[in-house]
Image: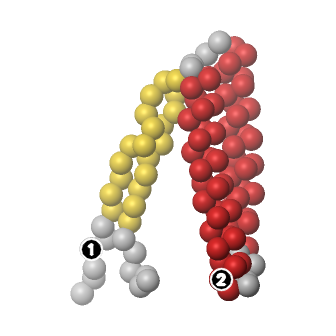
Amino acid sequence: MKEKKITEKQPLIEGSFHPDEANEIIRSLFNYKIQFHTVTALSIWVRTGQDPQYHHKRKSELAQSLKEVLKVIEQAKESGKLLRIASNVQVTITNTPI
């Protein structure tokens, strides 16, 4: 018997923002995620002594993404334009046991 896939999708950010507001929102989200991976990596290293490569890689990816998004925000600010931001959170139950 095939299990039904359960997914929930909810909007997180939706709207038009002044570049200063967009800057604050984007920095907050990215910095929180970077901090999460920093703390998690440290916790894994302390508990197991193993190098948490995934978390280091993810931190680098997020930092690079933040730089790219900040460039767009700066362009909007220089041209006196608003930014439209849309972000959803999608959660799916997998078949992978804990």
- Label 2 – label 1 distance at C-alpha: 36 Å
- Tell which tag, 2 or 1, sits nearer the viewer: 2
Looking at the image, tell me whether mark 2 or mark 1 is earlier in sequence order.
1
Left or right, 26 with respect to 48, comes to: left
Q: 85 and 26: which one is in front?
A: 26
Residue pictured at 75% horizontal, 49% vertical: 64
Q: How many marks?
A: 2
Left or right, 53 with respect to 88, comes to: right
Q: 2 and 33: which one is in front?
A: 33
Q: Quick check: 23 above or below 35? A: above
Q: 42 and 19: which one is in front?
A: 42
Outermost residue, top direction?
80
How far across and how far down the image is residue 44, in percent? 65, 77
Q: Which element is circle 1 on? A: loop
Left or right, 70 with respect to 30, comes to: right
How far across and how far down the image is residue 63, in percent? 73, 50
How far across and how far down the image is residue 20, in percent? 62, 23
Q: Which element is circle 2 on? A: helix
What residue sits right under mark 2 in the picture?
Answer: 47
Report the amino acid beneath label 2: Arg
Report the amino acid beneath label 1: Lys
Q: Quadrant of the C terminus?
A: bottom left
Left or right, 83 with respect to 55, comes to: left
Q: Quadrant of residue 95?
A: bottom left
What residue sits right under mark 1 in the picture?
Answer: 4
How far across and how far down the image is residue 37, in percent? 64, 63
Residue pictured at 60% horizontal, 54% vertical: 33
Q: Quadrant of residue 2?
A: bottom left
